[in-house]
Every structure is written in structure tokens, then in C-alpha cells.
Image: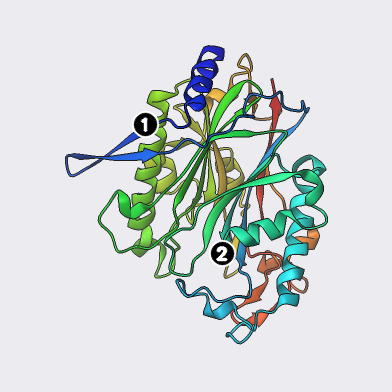
Amino acid sequence: MRNFLLFLALLISLGTILAIIFYEEGGANDIIEANIVQNEEVYEPLQPRDVYTVAFYNLENLFDIYDDPHTNDNQFLPDGSKKWTEEKYQKKLDDLSKVIYQLGDDDGPEIMGICEVENLQVMEDLIGTELLSEYNYDIVHYDSPDVRGIDVGLIYKKDAFKPFYSNAYAVKDFVKTRMRTRDILVVGGVVGMDSIFVFVNHWPSRIGGKEATEVKRVTVAEIVKSLKDSLYQQFPNADYLIMGDFNDEPADTSILHVLGASKDQEGRLFNPYYALAKEGRGTSTYRRNWFMLDQIILSTSMLDVEKSGLNFQPGNGHADIYNPEWLYHKKDPSKGPFRTYAGNKYQGGFSDHFPVYINFSLN
């Protein structure tokens, strides 16, 4: 691993590296060039910690109050159907910061994927809140082709994670489709002296019915698997985390069979949220039924207690949903998370999803 890092450092000193990722479609290979982010501080020593928390949170429509002429954000304007104001925006930022601040071991996650953010500015406003500003977070973000303009992103503590690679992969670059869905964000970085690649996802919704829309999520799952497998061929010693609001559950075809996220420790990917879903738990509700749509999937290399880097042991490690009582619907907890809006009716809550997190040890 040290030889790999020295080699990578040499490449970064040249400014960029060409990562060529192949995806086979109709017998032809598409070649995607991805720029490596130049970062001269990648190899500075990181602050040691006993617990290393990785999390994911769907923030439920974190929009600013300004019109973006290139997207359909009209609902979230002061004169829009939701009457979205500066006061409501600031309250939502403060509320979300309270959740993130207490995640994991009560000092915020070291790495956190997020979705349903309108742009870079709202992410900067979030990490600039009073509670989160002390954590010295930084951001990885790209604008996506989503019709409403909602994106995925990554925040991370600068003393805990050093990115050397980032790219956002658009679904339309891999398959012929009119589907304007969110990009797949891939961020590579260093934790300790080991490399890790984080995939942040927000897959197509179930609007129109689960079965009718399944093909869309299967398509994105195939692309994620292709990207991960291509990176694995180049970096077999790296760890891999695939997180997101998948709009599918751990036992669904896209997750279990296409992506190959196993319920046990066989194969290359392990999904600790399979067991939680089997218990009837979930991160979001529909008609008072719970669904485990938000998950963090990890490479089975992270289960090896002898390996350096992040380590997770089922039974000893901790993969969970963050769902304290105050995150539930105030009047009727069976309705699930206390959300910001129910239709156009302002609720004043946090999000319609609970966040998920894993506490790793750092070897």
C-alpha cells in the first residue's frame, strides 16, 4: 500500500492522472476520462481517532430561496407553491445541523454523503452553521442534470480524510436515455495510510410504481457496479463504500443481485442494512410502512481485522439508523420522520428520511 501511495503521489505531482473506466453497452466500450483533484496536502498525517463515522443523509429538498433559470425550482421560491422563505431556509439549516452534529459518536461524521441539495451554496451554508463550523468540514460537489436541480454531495472533516480523486458520472453518458436523474459521485481519498473510494448515490424514485420504475434503478446499479469493478481492477487494495438513497431495499434486485451487495460476508460487497431491513426497520415511510431505502454498503476487505485502515466487524462494529424520538413526526410517530413538507403544507421538520451511519475502527 505504501508503494501505491508513493506512486500516486508522483502522479499527483504531475497535476492529473487519467482514470479510464470502461462500460460495455451493446458490445462497445465507452471511455470516461476523470480528472484527479490535485491536493498537495494528501499525505500530511491525519488526526488519530478511536471511532471513525461514515454517514449518509437525504436532506429532503434543501433549496435556497433564489430562482435558478436552468432548473425547475419554482416550488421553492418565496412566491412558489411552498412559500419557501429565508426564515424557513435558515431554520432547516439549523435543524439539519443538529442532526449531523450528533451522528455517530456524538461529534459528527468524518465522512458524510448527502442528497437533495440544490447547489454548492446550500452545502456551504450547511457546514457554515454554528454547530458544524467547528468540525472544519470541506465539500465535494458537482451540479447534476436532474430536472429540479437536486444534487448529491460529500462533506468530510479535513483532518480525517484527504481526497485525491473526484468525478460525477452522468447516467446518460453510459446509456441512451432521456432520464435526467442525479449523477453518481465518486470520491477517492486517503484515510490513515490507506486509500478508499466513496460512491454517493440518489437513484430514480418509485413514482409511478416500484415495478414500473425498477428498470431505471437496475440501470443505475449496473453503471455503479461497472465503475466500481473498473476502479477495483486498477486499485485492488483500496476499500470501497457505496452509499445513498437507492429507492430500493437491500433484498431488491438492483442492490442484492445487480450490485452484488450481499447479506453475508461472501463476495466483494457486504450490506449491513440487510439485517436491519429484515427486522422491519427502515429510514422512510410510505402509507405508514417502513422502507430501508438509505444504506451504506462496504467492500468485504473492510471486514479483515488484520488489514490497516477502516475496519468493521458485524456484532462489534455499529451500523445503524439515527432515529432519536425527536426526529419522528410530532403528533403521530407511526407516520415516520418529521419532514419539512407534507405536500405543500409546511411541517417545519427535518427530513422525510432518517440518516444512516457506520462507526468504524481505524487500524
- Quadrant assignment for the C terminus: top right
* Numbered label attached to residue 196: none
**Is residue 147 toward the left or the right of residue 13 in the image?**
left
Who is closer to the viewer here, 38 or 244?
38
Specify which label sits upstream in the sequence, 2 or 1. Answer: 2
Residue at the (73%, 64%) spot, across then down: 93
**Is residue 89 toward the left or the right of residue 236 in the image?**
right
Q: For the residue carrying disc 1, how many other residues have a C-alpha within 10 Å: few (<14), some (14-19), or many (20+)?
A: some
Q: CA distance from mark 2 to mark 1?
A: 30 Å
The mark lying in front, picked from 2 and 1, is 2
Regarding residue 349, the answer to whether it shows in the image is: no
Q: Is residue 117 above or below residue 27?
A: below
- Quadrant assignment for the N terminus: top right
- Give the residue pinned by disc 2: 118
Q: For the residue carrying disc 2, how many other residues have a C-alpha within 10 Å: few (<14), some (14-19), or many (20+)?
A: many
Q: Is residue 168 above or below residue 4?
A: below
- Give the residue pinned by disc 1: 230
Regarding residue 65, the answer to whether it shows in the image is: yes
Residue 232: which quarter of the image? Answer: top left
Horizontal and vertical percent position of residue 336: 67, 65
**Is residue 260 toward the left or the right of residue 118 in the image?**
left
Residue at the (78%, 28%) spot, across then down: 49
Mark 1, secondary structure of its residue: helix
Looking at the picture, which amino acid does disc 1 mark? Ser
Looking at the picture, which amino acid does disc 2 mark? Glu
